[in-house]
Amino acid sequence: MTNVTNDIRYIGVNDHELDLFEGQYIVPEGMAYNSYMILDEKIAVFDTADRHFTEQWLANVAEALGGRTPDYLIVQHMEPDHSASIAAFLEKYPDTAVVGNAKTFAMLGQFFEKLHVENKVTVKDGDSLSLGKHLLQFVFAPMVHWPEVMFTYDSTDKVLFSADAFGKFGALDAEDDDWACEARRYYFGIVGKYGMQVQNVLKKAAKLDIRTICPLHGPVLSENLGYYLDLYNTWSSYGVESEGVCIAYTSVYGNTKYAAELLAEALKGRGCPKVAITDLAREDMAEAVEDAFRYGKLVLATTTYNAEIFPFMKHFIDDLTERGYQNRTIGLIENGTWAPMAAKVMKGMFEKSKNITWLETTVTIKSAVTQENREQIAKMADELMA
């Protein structure tokens, strides 16, 4: 347990047992399930913890209470990694009022069939709740990234409790000096589809005097907040964060991989500030998605496969388009021994994507890289660096 401010305590837990967050994202550094408490004339607890850590979390609650009784449990997000311990909490502290919105309570009944909350406070966007010295304001953030999500702003200590926003992968006791890397992978994997909704809530947040951000995952942010807010603005507006090229490939016998590597070397030789190259069959798909959104230019290289494209490439493009991939330049490298059509298939998968600029050069390999292909790759590198 640590202090966020004189009156705000961190009471969350670290999870080093989890292998896949949300059943798909690898988390080698674990996860943090953050929970907070404001100690005032009345006491408010913010969110709970994953069911595997209920007892540990309740022990943290009891220690922070120091013999007192909580008045409110504020439920900002009903995803089970934050809400699963609600029933256990209310069993121990039955007189606590549960604070949520109409959608919160609808979901509460779905997750806890036998839980009947008698003492509840249903709030609307902009409503306030006084704890005594601390005045809380509720800021609805629908689809960031569930429809019931709301932030809570403590106007006394200038703290924004931001639910899943500004979160990241990794336990708080893990060694990680680069917040942006795992926050970016987290954002585009989980929240990336909802850029417009994030933009809307950022506009609301801009009207608040925020000095500390308390997310439900990752560290409390209290310094250089402009850095984090600017990144979220770039990510949610689908802007280019860093100059560079992402090359994503799949390869069956190594020829398409060789072409991708030739392009990477050509770009480096031309002074490209960053070349991120990924084997989609072997490396973390979420990392590849992160890189595709980070950089302004993307090259996709794959084989024709069953008259379509290799499955890992199809998965990757689906991940991009599902998350609203836009405002980017894309180049294509295809391979096919008798009927190459991967470029046509890949281009078609982006037909609903906005503001995509296609390179004039498309590299078509028929089995193995030829001298003509080398010249095409050099031309593609020139286009990417123009």
Image: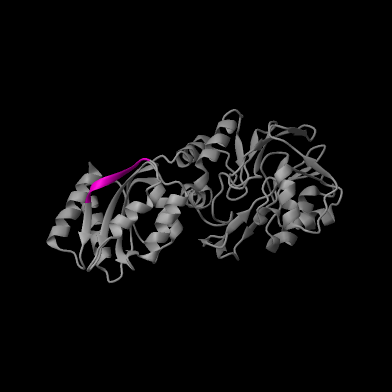
Quarter of the image with the C terminus is top left
Which residue occupies the foreground of this view, 125 or 202? 125
The mark tally for this picture is: 0
338 vs 371, left or right, is: right
Which residue occupies the foreground of this view, 247 or 174? 247
Which residue is rendered at x = 55% and y = 39% of the image?
A: 197
Which residue is rendered at x = 78% and y = 56% of the image?
A: 87
Q: Main structural element of the magenta stretch: helix, strand or loop?
A: strand
Q: Could you say where residue 149 lies in the image, as x and y percent from the top left?
A: 65, 44
Asked if residue 143 is positioned above or below residue 92 in the image, the reply reads above
Q: Could you say where residue 231 lies in the image, as x and y percent from the top left?
A: 47, 40
Q: Residue furthest top?
A: 207
213 vs 11, left or right, is: left
Q: Could you say where residue 153 lies in the image, as x and y percent from the top left?
A: 67, 35
Residue 340 placement: quadrant: bottom left
Colour mode of the rendering: one colour
Residue 284 placement: quadrant: bottom left
Which residue occupies the foreground of this view, 195 or 226? 195
The answer, for residue 10, to whether it is visible in the render is yes
Which residue is rendered at x = 63% and y = 37% of the image?
A: 160
256 magenta-colored: no
Q: Could you say where residue 72 lies in the image, as x and y percent from the top left?
A: 79, 43
343 vs 161, left or right, is: left
The answer, for residue 280, to whether it is visible in the render is no
Question: Which residue range is magenta in the image?
Answer: 355-361
359 magenta-colored: yes
Asked if residue 372 is positioned above or below residue 383 in the image, the reply reads below
